[in-house]
Image: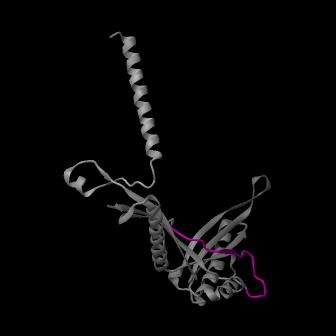
Amino acid sequence: MPSTLRTVAFSAAIATLCGLTVTLAVFAVTRPSILLAAPSASSASTGTSTFDQGVITSGDGLVSKKPDLALISVGVESKENTATAAQQDLAAKAGKLIARAKALGIADKDVNTSGYFVGPNYVASNTIDGYRAFEQLRLKWHDVDTVGKTLDALVEEGGGTQISVGFTLADPKVAQAEARTLAIGDARSRAQAMAGAAGIKLGKVLRVSDLSITGYRSANYDLAGSAAPASTQVPVGQLDVQVSVEVDFAIDG
């Protein structure tokens, strides 16, 4: 065969293969979501490639709980003519703040440094106007109902600035388990509705997948620079713990 004809034939074969690949890809994307491609028990024993059909649904579960842990972020800062002076002044301020935190009953294991900085302070035209030092602490406060008074003490007596607080659950596993049970029940209800509409009978569960995103919403209060004479009010409220699942059911009969 002449080289020109071979080139044309080869190009045509490639085009045909690409067209077939695109067709298969489109078919795969648009396949009915009610079908589940799962090997049957008989195919596993015989080595054939037949598949059982099934019903695939998702479910959501939501549980609201009162948080039992406050996460307090509190910082101190200093500005001096030299980096050494700024660092020394910061050490004294941080020591006072940590001592006040411990006096309030915060354990050593619940106090850690989340940020530390020492560097030049720039003004107009990139001129260095002294040096700044900053340290941020992260504190765990387990009595959420008294967090307002704790914030006041850290500011007024501990010298803290740049304060914020958020709430969470010390152990979210119980709430997550409750939400997961609700999510699977929701998925089953949806699957039964789909099966009834399709005129089929729902079978056993083939697979359960957790689609949840780690974490949950928590109010975060920014109290930077607040040291008002009145006691700080920080409503605790409730946290929403949500779990999402995907459940694959077989078709019975």
The quarter of the displayed image where residue 66 is located: bottom right
Quadrant the N terminus occupies:
top left
Quadrant the C terminus occupies:
bottom left
Give the answer, above or below, for where 203 lies relative to 169: above
84 or 111, which is in the foreground?
Answer: 111
The quarter of the displayed image where residue 156 is located: bottom right
Left or right placement of residue 112 versus residue 3 in this view: right
Q: Residue at x 44, y 58 (%)?
A: 198
233 or 134, which is in the foreground?
Answer: 233
Q: Is residue 225 magenta?
A: yes
Q: Position of residue 19 (x, y in %)?
A: 44, 31
168 or 104, which is in the foreground?
Answer: 168
Q: Residue at x 58, y 79 (%)?
A: 139
Q: Position of residue 175 (x, y in %)?
A: 49, 78
Left or right placement of residue 189 versus residue 53 in this view: right
Magenta stretch in the rendered image: 214-231
Give the answer, above or below, for where 1 lies relative to 76: above
Q: Is residue 215 magenta?
A: yes
Q: Position of residue 183 (x, y in %)?
A: 48, 70
Give the answer, above or below, for where 63 lies relative to 10: below
Q: How many marks?
A: 0
Q: Return the residue found at the far front.
A: 199
Left or right placement of residue 115 versus residue 175 in this view: right
Give the answer, above or below, for where 170 lies relative to 36: below
Q: Residue at x 70, y 65 (%)?
A: 131
Prevailing secondary structure class for the magenta stretch in the rendered image: loop
Left or right placement of residue 146 versus residue 9 in this view: right
Residue 47 visible, this orientation: yes
Q: Position of residue 157 (x, y in %)?
A: 69, 86
108 or 240, which is in the foreground?
Answer: 240
